[in-house]
Image (cartoon, rainbow, N blue to C red):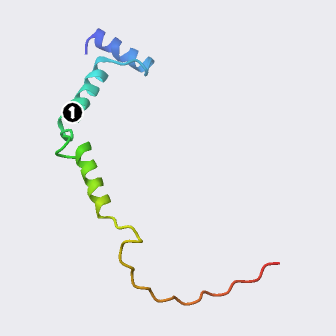
Amino acid sequence: MDKKQKLELLKDIKNPLRITNRDVEDLKSRVDKIEQDPPLPIKGVDYFTEEELQGMCEYVQSQIHQGVDGEQGIQGEKGEQGIQGETGP
């Protein structure tokens, strides 16, 4: 390690907030990894487009029957009575 490198190292120790070339290279290598792996999602392939979402909403809404026009469901059985609570003051 030459005198210039030692001086840079001492400056880093004296001022920990100082960003060095080594710090920049370390951060750059991390960013490069993020950009490469995993690949970014592709609209229309990895998630739905606005047109596809609108089409799904329209389909679901077309399948909904209004209560008045739809069939009446079967009446379910009545459950047991719960435990009676205490009377308040």
- Front-lying residue, 39 or 48: 48
Residue at point 59%, 89% (across, down): 81
Quarter in which the C terminus is drawn: bottom right
Answer with left or right where residue 11 lies relative to residue 78.
Answer: left
Q: How many marks?
A: 1
> Badge 1, how many Cα within 10 Å: few under 14, some, many 20+?
few
Write down the quadrant of residue 33 in the picture. Answer: top left
> Farthest residue toward the right?
89
Reply above or below: 62 against 12.
below
Reply above or below: 59 against 24.
below
Write down the quadrant of residue 8 in the picture. Answer: top left
Quarter in which the N terminus is drawn: top left
Residue 6 point in image, percent of width and height: 32, 14
- Front-lying residue, 27 or 3: 27
- Front-lying residue, 5 or 46: 46
Residue at point 25%, 30% (across, down): 31
Residue at point 35%, 17% (across, down): 9
Answer with left or right where residue 14 lies relative to residue 89.
Answer: left
Disc 1 secondary structure class: helix
> Farthest residue toward the front?
69
- Please name the residue that numbered disc 1 is placed on: 35
Reply above or below: 10 against 49.
above
Write down the quadrant of residue 13 in the picture. Answer: top left
Residue at point 28%, 48% (across, down): 54
> Farthest residue toward the top?
4
What amino acid is at disc 1?
A: Glu
- Front-lying residue, 4 or 59: 59
Residue 48 point in image, percent of width and height: 23, 47
Residue 14 point in image, percent of width and height: 44, 17
